[in-house]
Amino acid sequence: MELPAWFEQQEFYTFCALIAAVLMMFGVKRIILVRLKEKARSETSSMSSIYRVLVLSLNAPLTVVILVIVLLLARNVFTWTGLHEQHVPVFLDGVVEAGVIIALFLFAERFFTYSLKRYREQSTLVKNTSAIAGGALRAVLATLTILIILSNMGVSITPVIASLGITSLAVALALQPTLENFFSGIQLVMDKPIRIGDFIELDSGEQGFVEKIGWRSTWIRMLPNNIVIMPNSKLSNSKLINYYYPERELSVPVEVGVHYSSDLELVEKVCIEVAEKTLKEHEYGVDTYQPFVLFHTFDNSSINLTIMLRTKEYFNRFFIKSAFIKSLKKRFDEEGIVIPFPITAVNTEQEGARLPRD
């Protein structure tokens, strides 16, 4: 039986060898990805997420690398068989270099994108800025990739770089307030003077809970349940009090005055007993805290003292203070301790002013 003419041609065997090489390389790619997935299952949570990011990031770049290797094999095979000039384009070397650059671009872009998705749940700023950060990174990587490819092809990129520099300067000047807020937001997240859920007080006197830290502004929910939207640049340059840092527990001073005839030892004992009972029984009290009393002022009609309590967080201080004052007043009445108060006397018999007569 006579074989077809194309079966005996050298190009046929070369083509079959290339197909076999492609199939083998795709098999190797699959083995690598499967091994990385198995590694991700066996490692700890942090390492497991890194391996998952690698698996997702390597899929497309490995495909491009395989195609580049196929082109290199084709060039070498055709060169060895003397068919180089007939079947291999002259610009094949440039295509191979471009393929390598594109593979690196795909890996960097995907690795950064999937890393952002991994950390977006851990940081509100990352979650809110992942879209714009990902887009900016893709634009930068794509620009660098195109410039490198053009440079390898012999195209002068100096005018392009100069144009990009001028354009970037113009954009930076136009977006100066936006960029200032963006980098201030990054500073807030990195330095962590405030976090989501913190109760803060601004230098303007406004108080509220931090609801959101975005790439341009921070949202603060005030006590009347309204939202104040503050630019990040203004917030980062402001003096503020964070009532949840370094911890949420907060001392609550309560000032009271007693009559000069009072037994101060008894007053101190009663105040501490009432304070301890309030802290243990009230849901917002810190029962492990030891309250104390400080006498500090001889006032006009009373000796003033301060009782120090402790509550679980700033917003609860109103409730713990109210409960303590009610209990203390009741106990003072039982012990006969007097809380003096000013008395105003009105003299209705005072002689009226005499007006001169004409």
Image: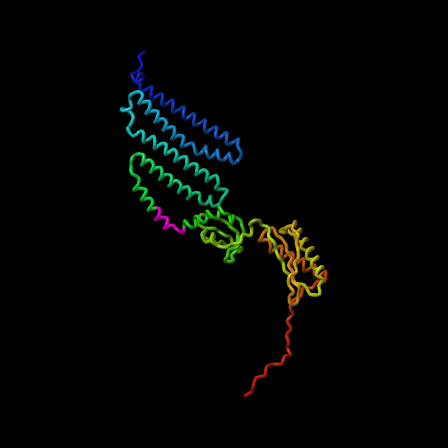
Start-end of magenta stretch = 168-177
- Determine the residue positioned at 53% across, 50% down: 198
Q: Residue furthest top?
A: 1
Q: Is residue 75 among what the camera can see?
A: yes
- How far across and down, in percent of the image, does residue 262 sit? 71, 63
- How far across and down, in percent of the image, does residue 229 sit? 47, 53
Image quarter of residue 113: top left
Q: Is residue 225 among what the camera can see?
A: no
Which corner quadrant holds the N terminus?
Answer: top left
**Vertical position of residue 222 compared to residue 68: above or below:** below
Depth order, front residue of 4/139? 139
Image quarter of residue 257: bottom right
Which corner quadrant holds the C terminus?
Answer: bottom right
**Vertical position of residue 133 compared to residue 207: above or below:** above
Q: In the displayed structure, does residue 111 sit left or right of residue 97?
A: right
Q: In the displayed structure, does residue 194 sit left or right of residue 329?
A: left
- Determine the residue positioned at 37% across, 27% down: 69
Overall secondary structure of the magenta section: helix
Could you tell me how many numbered marks the image carries?
Answer: 0
